[in-house]
Amino acid sequence: MPFWDRLFRRPAAKPQPDGAETAPLDPGLLGGELRGPAMRRIMVGTSQSTGVERAHNEDALFALLGSASGEGSVPDFGLFVVADGMGGHRSGEVASSVSVRSVAHRLAKDSLLHLLQEDGVAEDMPIQELVRQALEEANHSVVSRVPGGGTTLTAVLLLGSLMTIGHVGDSRAYLFSNGHGEVLTRDHSLVKRLEELGQLTEAEAAVHPQRNVLYKAIGQGANLEVDVLTHPVPKDGFLMLCSDGLWGVVAEEDIERIVWNSPHPQIACDELVRAANAAGGPDNITAILVYFPAD
């Protein structure tokens, strides 16, 4: 039995008949704190499934959320990462795991841990540059350690009221605010590029036979151009990171409905994974959902 399960004596989740590696969530485990107007803290949920058609999981995720109070307290902070590996002979799952660990280590060491120093000063390097370098270092790690492997990677560093996003590939970051949803990241896929050039419509791109072909990914070359942006956190809204096993299968209106109608991010993540599996589950599925209170 894994150490964490031994420590807290948690029963292992039973395999689901649709292949999902999730189990029904007992709302009692949430401590009675469900989303609503009175909720004044950030909440996070994560869920993952191999899917119905795949034999093993090549997705990886990392989620860390922290807060502090008292004299000289630090702002809310968090780090959220999703990666979707690719490559034969299990190279994809190694590439995604290596890249997530590399990014999490660099950003935790050079930003989050600095917040906990006595003077509370973060790394002198601009946050966007720090995020960019973290993804570039992950790229070098995959190139050297996983020849032939590659992975998408979307990482969000939360510091107070701002979140900085580093992105390569076609895993996505979504923002849900004021009852609407939008994609914050740009897919680095062939069909998206053709769509941007006016050679494909959005409907044609969604069913194109090469819709999964990427022109940019972690591990696919020594030089990598990383997309980086900073966005304010939403008020009474959500940030979602997910692999294309979710957004490529479940319609956006259904994703939005599940996010807005669920009382807790964990419940929403589990329902999103179930929806992707119910739609055929052709790929691995990963979702991280972060709720931000109104104030």
Image (tube, rainbow, N blue to C red):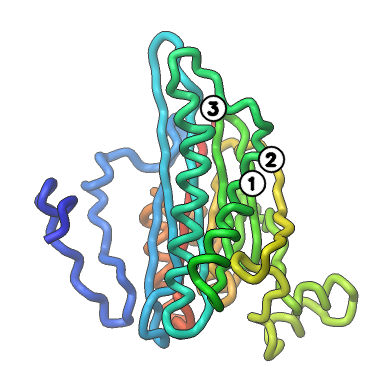
Question: Which residue was labeled with disc 3?
Answer: 295
Report the quarter where the N terminus lies: bottom left
Identify the amino acid type marked 2.
Glu
Residue at the image position 64 percent from the left and 80 percent from the top: 212
Q: Earlier in the sequence, mark 1 or mark 3?
A: 1
Q: Residues within 10 Å of mark 3 (few under 14, many from 20)?
A: few
Question: Which residue was labeled with disc 2?
Answer: 129
Nearer to us in this view, 254 or 58 = 58
Does the rendering let one see residue 243?
A: yes
Does the rendering let one see residue 179?
A: no
Residue at the image position 38 percent from the left and 71 percent from the top: 49
Q: Position of residue 224 (x, y in %)?
A: 70, 60
Q: Is residue 189 above or below residue 97?
A: below
The tag on residue 133 is: 1
Identify the amino acid type marked 1.
Gln
Identify the amino acid type marked 3.
Asp
Nearer to us in this view, 81 or 16 = 81
Q: Residues within 10 Å of mark 2 (few under 14, many from 20)?
A: few
